[in-house]
Each structure stands twice: as C-alpha cells, then as structure tokens.
Image (cartoon, rainbow, N blue to C red):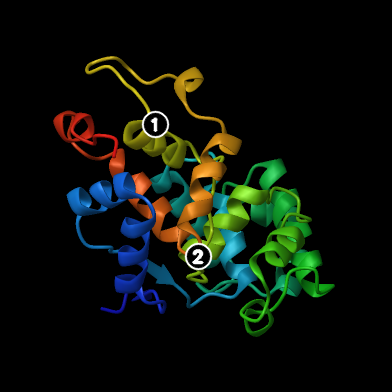
Amino acid sequence: MDDGLRPVRYDTALALEQLASADAKLGTLIERVGAFQLKVKSTHSPFEALLEAILYQQLHANAAKAILGRLLAGFGDIHPQPEQLLAAPEEMLRAAGLSRSKLLSLRDLAARTLDGTVPTLAAIRRMPDAEIIERLSQVRGIGTWTAEMLLIFRLGRPDVFPATDYGVRKGYLLTFGKTKAGKPITADMLPKPEQMERRAARWKPWRSVASWYLWRACELPPLAKGLLKEH
C-alpha cells in the first residue's frame, strides 16, 4: 500500500560526505546512527498539510488522528477545500473534537489560503525557505517551527535548521555538550538556539540532514552518547 512517502530528492550521499568533512564530531554521530532515512510526504497541498499540523499541535498522535478522521468524515472522507471549511457550521467542526482555538486557526488558514497568503503547492515549490516561513507564520496557530517542519518533512528542503526544536536542542547537547551519565536532561541544560546556529553555519547547505541526525542522537543508548568524543 502506498503510504504517500518518498525519499528526498537531494543528494544525500554528497550531504553526508560534506557534513562529515565540515564537522568531524557530527561525522562521528552520522557514523553511529547509520543511513539517512528521512522520507517526505508530498501528496498534500500546503492547506491540507497545515490543517493536519494544526490538528496535531499539543495532542497525542492517536487523539489527533481520531479528530482528523472525524473531521474528514464530515466532508466525505477527504480533505475539505478552504471554502467548504469556512462554510461548515461551527457545531459540525466542534463535534469532530476541535477546540475553539483550533477551529479559529483552521478558519484563518482557510481564509489566508483563499486570499493567497498561503500559497498553492505549485507556487510554494518555487519559493525560498525564508519567504515560506514568513508567509505561513501569518496564519493563526502557525509559527516558525511548524513552517520549518513543513519545509523539512513535506517539501523536502535540504537546508532548514529548527533551532528551537526540543529534540534538535537535546540532540545537540548530547552530541556537542557535556552531560553526566544517568543524570536527567532538564530544560535549563539545553543549548541556546543562537549558540547552535553558530556551529550549524558550517553545516550549510545540508542543515536539514544534520537536524535529522541530531533527532536520532536522542535515541542512541547512553553508552553510545558518551562515546561521542570531541575532535
């Protein structure tokens, strides 16, 4: 069954080679994690992808999936068009499980799709990352992080660095910082985004790939984390 996922279209072998050459310690992490396995989901329009992103915010994945299923069922088991979402009765949307805040966010998303603020799939593919983030961040409930996730996991952009992401910050600490075995990692221990961005400058134009490996660093067994020595 087609899951709608496909490999990224950029040269991952070249990316790994250049990242390891630019940052030996990141290269060690890459070696320990293994093959780059990011796949992107590109079957949805920006409107549909952001609709799902809003629904999944601050919810367990299973709960969000159930709400999405009920919402789509109200439109014939397909994603609604922006006009349909705006015309749908509030009672119908709330019955699917939408909070008042998410309902307002979805309606704003629909309105900003219709007025062109949220671009079409064809248009967004031609736009630079910074412009996409600026445009999408105008939507209620959509911030920089959500736009960055769309860039990495939907559009397959190779050079996005979500420096505020908890997993990326934790992976950075485990890879480049100092931690004590057995000691829990707390929020105050995480590196500041600006500190990370300074080092990440050497990872251009492959910061999405580096970010994927930082996420994987969080999954390494404790011994492996401790063996990531400075070069």
Q: CA distance from mark 2 to mark 1?
A: 22 Å
Residue closest to the eye, 45 or 83:
45
Judging from the image, what secondary structure is the residue with disc 2 in? loop
Residue 83 percent across, percent down from the top left: 76, 73
Question: What residue sits 50% from the left and 49% below the top?
Answer: 200
Q: Amino acid at mark 1?
A: Leu
Which residue in the rendered view is the most extreme toward the left? 223
Q: Is residue 214 left or right of residue 147?
A: left
Question: What residue sits 85% from the left and 72% below the top?
Answer: 115
Say which quadrant the C terminus sits in. top left
Question: What residue sits 60% from the left and 37% below the top?
Answer: 194
Q: Is residue 17 left or right of residue 83?
A: left
Residue closest to the eye, 21 or 187:
21
Q: Is residue 74 left or right of residue 60?
A: right
Judging from the image, what secondary structure is the residue with disc 1 in? helix
First in residue order: circle 2 vs circle 1: 1
Say which quadrant the N terminus sits in. bottom left
Q: Amino acid at mark 2?
A: Pro
Q: Residues within 10 Å of mark 1 (few under 14, many from 20)?
A: many
Q: Residues within 10 Å of mark 2 (few under 14, many from 20)?
A: some
Q: Is residue 54 visible?
A: no
Q: Which numbered dot is residue 205?
A: 2
Badge 2 vs badge 1, beta-carbon distance below 8 Å: no
- Label 2 vs label 1, nearer the camera: 2
Which residue in the rendered view is the most extreme toward the bottom? 122
Q: Is residue 67 left or right of residue 103?
A: left
Q: Which residue is mark 1?
A: 173
